Image (cartoon, rainbow, N blue to C red):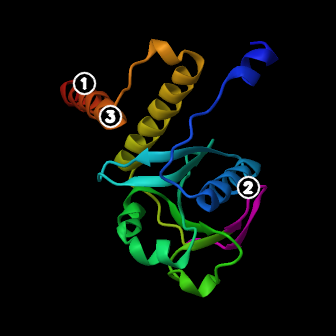
Amino acid sequence: MSQSFFNAVSIPVDGRQSETAQMVARGTSRFLSSLGFSCVEELSLPSGGRADLVAMNAQGDIWIVEIKSSREDLRADRKWESYRAHCDRLFFAFPAELPCDLFPPETGLIVADNYGAYQHCDAPEHRLPAPTRKAMMIRFGLVAARRMSRLIDPQGHGMVDERNLFGAALGSWFFWNLYQG
């Protein structure tokens, strides 16, 4: 595709995140990309939650990064604890103004700004069971493809609730495998 096409594409802004959270997400995505990961923001999880950032690499490693922009943001949110069931490693990403000791010790820490990030400490690894990994990989791929399609052809795709997309796709996969076995 021509360069002018990509210059014309505008990414919709999600409005739920603060400017600080958006900057942390951008810097964290750049950092993870430098490590060989691709990222999807605001990915709905099978448990019903929505992870701020899900990253996957060519080896199938899945990391979830929960973005916190302030002390209040961290205090108000306890849903991140359930995210561990959907990833190999769980991180918090936050701006440098926040002290690291605010965050739970059983998570990794990434300090980020609008331009990049660094890993302050690694997250403990807890490998996903194969069925959960497969479900997350399918979810990641479907959402990434759907979002890319909407950017390329905004009028060609109605507003699709991504949660319903997963139910249909994973339900079909489940029944197909059930009858193959």
Mark 1–mark 2 distance (CA, rounded to whole Å): 38 Å
Looking at the picture, tell me which residue is in the foreground, 107 or 163. 163
Look at the image and give the residue range highlighted in magenta: 111-123
Relative to 108, say whether 170 is above or below. Answer: above
Mark 3–mark 1 distance (CA, rounded to whole Å): 15 Å
Tell me if mark 1 has few (under 14), some (14-19) or many (20+) residues whose alpha carbon lies within 10 angstroms of its own: few
Relative to 101, say whether 147 is above or below. Answer: above
Which residue occupies the extreme bottom position in the image? 101
Residue 137 colored in magenta in the image: no
Tell me if mark 3 has few (under 14), some (14-19) or many (20+) residues whose alpha carbon lies within 10 angstroms of its own: some
Residue that label 2 marks:
31
Q: Tell me which numbered mark, 3 or 1, is placed earlier along the sequence.
A: 3
Residue that label 1 marks:
176
Q: Tell me which numbered mark, 2 or 3, is placed earlier along the sequence.
A: 2
Q: Quadrant of the C terminus?
A: top left
Residue at (31% x, 48% y) in the render: 46
Q: Is residue 47 left or right of residue 59?
A: left
Q: Tell me which numbered mark, 1 or 2, is placed earlier along the sequence.
A: 2
Which amino acid type is marked by label 2?
A: Phe
Looking at the rendered structure, which numbered label has been put on residue 166? Answer: 3
Residue at (46% x, 33% y) in the render: 143
Which amino acid type is marked by label 1?
A: Trp
Q: Position of residue 24 (x, y in %)?
A: 65, 60
Quadrant in which residue 77 is drawn:
bottom left
